Every structure is written in structure tokens, then in C-alpha cells.
Image: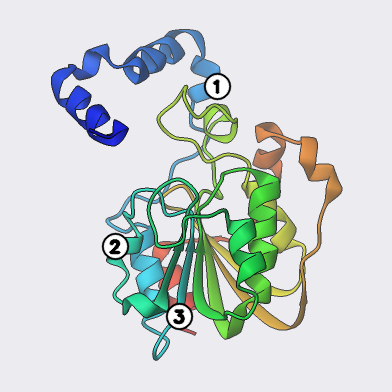
Amino acid sequence: MNIEKIKAYLKLLVPPILLPVYFSKLYNRFFNRDKIIHHFEYESNFYSRHAFINRAISKYKDCKYLEIGVFNNSVFNTIPLKMKNKFGVDPIKGGNFKMTSDDFFHQNKHLKFDVIFIDGLHEYEQCQRDCINSMKCLNDGGIILFHDLLPRSFFEEKELQNKQSSWSGDVWKVAVELNNSKNVELKIINIDHGIGILKLKKDFQYIKMDNLKNESFNEFLEYKKKLPIISSEEAFEFISK
């Protein structure tokens, strides 16, 4: 029996109240209240990242799709394309390319895609590399989507994967850089942890901001005021243009 099956059986046998994540949540509720408080809330409706990805895919005939960070296939399995057109990259589980995104891009420089969804390691420098590599292999008129661009609290932004149920990391820094880059169109949907939509124009240029590396959630709240945040309805219109 593999380790995944063992974990599945343990979940059935162990009451939720005894799981470590329950105690972490309880601890945070009492001792880290200031760090778990949400500084804003997402739009309340029935959409998620799946809806916007599939709207983007519907624009292209014989669409080529790339997903970075597949994990449990919750998104990848909803993509209505032939398997030869679906590329899911994850070094641990899920997808059909078991490797890091860095290795994938290095080994497949000849491939081009119409829609790319970036939801890999939630760390700034890795997401930055994924974004720049994706921009290089995007077909003209293609779309890149991102997940986790809008953390609501210190804990959602901080690298504490095992201490809270929701972790967006600091990939918001990529959004800030894109918002200051040249010849790109960026929109961020205020839903599902912040979904980015990126379109490229002629002579686009990704501009890095070295000062972002050591900045954290407090700085994010200031940058957020200038980010191009839109509603779900506006996002569908932007994708369809």
C-alpha cells in the first residue's frame, strides 16, 4: 500500500478535531489573531479559476494548454481538450510531465501555447521564472493566467504552508512587476485568492524590481492600491477581447 492510500485511510479513521491542522487553526485563533485577520474579502459569487481558464481556452481553435503546478489535477482534469494538447507539469504529483517547471521549459523550448495557467511553487522568484518562461512560449494573442496574487492576511502571504489552511505565498510580487512592465496588459480578478490575466503586446518587456525581494504583506497592502483589480464580469469581457 502506498503512502497516499495510507493517508486516505487515516483521514477516514481520525476525527477532524484530532488532525494537526485543527490544532494549528485553534492556536492561531488565540495567539495570532492579528496575523490571520483578513484585510479585505474576495468577490462573493459562484466562479473559480476553472471558469476563467476555460473561457480563455474557448477562444482558440485546437488550443494548446500548459499548466504549471498541477498537484491533484483539480483544474487539469476540467480542461476540455484532447490529451495531446494538454501539458500538466508538476514534480511531485498530477499532470503528465513529472518534472520541475524549470526543467520543462529548458527541455521543451520548441513548444508554443495559447493558454498557460501558473499555479506552481508559491514563491516569488520561482513564479517570476515561470512567468518569464511562459511569456517566451506564448503564441501571439495568447493568455497567461495566475493563481494566488491577492493574499488577504499576513499568514496567507507568509511561507507557513503547514500552519494555515490557505497559503498564497509572495507571488503577488510578480503582479507588481507585471503592472510596471512594458507592453503588457494585466488584470487581477478579486476572487479565488486573486486570479491574474496577462496579455502581451508587441515588444513586451518584463521589468524586475529588486526592491521587492525583502518586502512582505504590509508593503503588499500599499502596492495593492495600484493593482488593476477587476470583477468577475469584467474579467470575462477582458478575456473575450
Q: Cα distance, mark 3 to mark 1?
A: 41 Å
Q: Cα distance, mark 3 to mark 2?
A: 15 Å
Q: Name the secondary structure under disc 1.
A: helix
- Picture quadrant of residue 87: bottom left
Where is residue 94 drawn, in percent x and y? Answer: 37, 53
Where is residue 89 drawn, in percent x and y? Answer: 48, 59
Residue drawn 40% across the image and 48% down it: 93
- Picture quadrant of residue 142: bottom right
Give the labeled residue for mark 1. 35
Please state which of residues 23 and 175 is positioned toward the viewer in this rendering: 23
123 shown above or below 240: above
Label 1 packing within 10 angstroms: few (<14), some (14-19), many (20+): some
Q: Is residue 196 left or right of residue 134?
A: left
Name the front one of labels 1 and 2. 2
Residue most extreme to the front: 1
Q: Earlier in the sequence, mark 1 or mark 2?
A: 1
Give the labeled residue for mark 3. 64
Please state which of residues 183 and 117 is positioned toward the viewer in this rendering: 117
Where is residue 64 drawn, in percent x and y? Answer: 45, 80
| Type of the residue with mark 3 | Lys
Give the labeled residue for mark 2. 77
Q: Could you tell me how many numbered marks the image carries?
A: 3
Using the image, tell me which numbered label, if any, was put on residue 200.
Answer: none
Q: Name the secondary structure under disc 2.
A: helix
Where is residue 67 drawn, in percent x and y? Answer: 47, 63
Would residue 225 be seen by someone viewing this image from the given angle? no
Please state which of residues 54 and 83 is positioned toward the viewer in this rendering: 83
Q: Cα distance, mark 1 to mark 2?
A: 35 Å
Q: Are marks 1 and 2 in contact (CB under 8 Å)?
A: no
